[in-house]
Amino acid sequence: MSKIEQYQIFGCAAELGSFSQAAEKLGVSNSHISKQMARLEVALGYKLFHRSPHLFLTEAGETLLPNVQSMLECYSNLEQTGQALKEDISGIVRLSVPPLLARELVLPELPRLMNEYPELKIDLTVEQPTLKAFSDKQDIIITMGQLSDSSLICKSLGQCSVVLVATPDYLMQKGEPRMPSDLKDHHCMASHFRLFNSAVPWVFHKDKKQFAVEIESRVAMNDIYGIKTLVKAHMGVGVMLKFFVEEEIRSGKLVQVLPDFQFASRPPIYMVSRERQLLPANVRVLKAFLGEVIGQRLN
């Protein structure tokens, strides 16, 4: 037991004039109180209490008591201040998020977090972050794709489901593919987006079987927003991250093509920070928020 705890027992017993009442108040046994007071007296080199027939302070104990009470008050204030700092959700947290995740997942939910913690400030950089670019000024980055070895703390938030989509009008005109090989007869929109480079053969899985299809893209680009725009204009079949087109599929504006086949590419998403423990409260709150809003949509 620490000295501060022994002094807390001393102050409580002196206030109540009873070891048994001090034990009851502190939630410990009578023997524990007696043992700790005996150890404190040995450490100090003098008696603090007269124990018979009633408990009362010795002259040394009376001299010590005001100093102990003052020390315990300072300690209590220090504990309260430390807890307040620990729980204070304020100040700036610096965050870097890829554009697609920022616009589709993070920003729509961000007002809820800011309303809950009005003193919290977020410095958000919308870019494709890399671990090499992780600077001392950044608290958290969200990154998509496989990670290289790193001393940073990386938490997986899940994997992005990838789907093929087209409009009902396009499928009515061209027919709906039943097998991956049918895609050769369709206008396909290939993306150079680094997370699922669909300019190479499209690979699908079903029932532990693999299906690879060489696609001749009518349009290829490095912008997933551009692919979505063309698909919605009835130009063909496009590869999309599922969370990016969930609303359109739900509303019937887009139809998932080959829903029984799983696109092989499932880009992972990671949340990266420098420390696992002793993070400021504002960083911990933002990490929990990001894990919730991104993880729920992916999983």
Image (cartoon, helix red, strand yellow):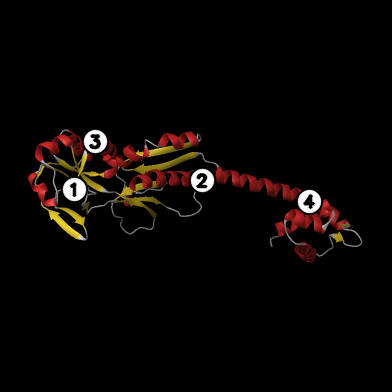
In percent of the image, x 32 and y 42: which residue is there?
A: 101
Q: Give the mark toward the camera: 2 or 4.
A: 2
Distance from the alpha carbon under mark 1 to that under mark 3: 16 Å
Report the disc number at residue 281: 2
Amino acid type, mark 4 = Asn
Residue 137 falls in image quadrant: top left
**Badge 1 or badge 3: first in the primary sequence:** 3
**Badge 2 or badge 4: first in the primary sequence:** 4
In percent of the image, x 56 and y 46: which residue is there?
A: 86
Camera-side residue: 47 or 53?
A: 53
Amino acid type, mark 2 = Ala
Where residue 212 sits in the image (x, y, percent)? 14, 55
Distance from the alpha carbon under mark 2 to that under mark 4: 34 Å
**Badge 1 or badge 2: first in the primary sequence:** 1
Report the disc number at residue 252: 3
Residue neighbourhood size for the residue with mark 4, other residues' Cα within 10 Å, grouped as few (<14), some (14–19), many (≥20): few
Residue neighbourhood size for the residue with mark 1, other residues' Cα within 10 Å, grouped as few (<14), some (14–19), many (≥20): some
Residue neighbourhood size for the residue with mark 2, other residues' Cα within 10 Å, grouped as few (<14), some (14–19), many (≥20): some
**Badge 2 or badge 3: first in the primary sequence:** 3
Q: Give the mark toward the camera: 4 or 1.
A: 1
- Tag 1 residue: 258
Q: Tell whether label 2 touches label 1 (CB within 8 Å).
A: no
In the rendered image, the vertical position of residue 122 relative to residue 271, given as above or below: above
Distance from the alpha carbon under mark 2 to that under mark 3: 43 Å
Determine the secondary structure under disc 1. Answer: loop
Determine the secondary structure under disc 2. Answer: helix
- Tag 4 residue: 67
Camera-side residue: 298 or 123?
A: 298
Amino acid type, mark 1 = Leu
Amino acid type, mark 3 = Gly
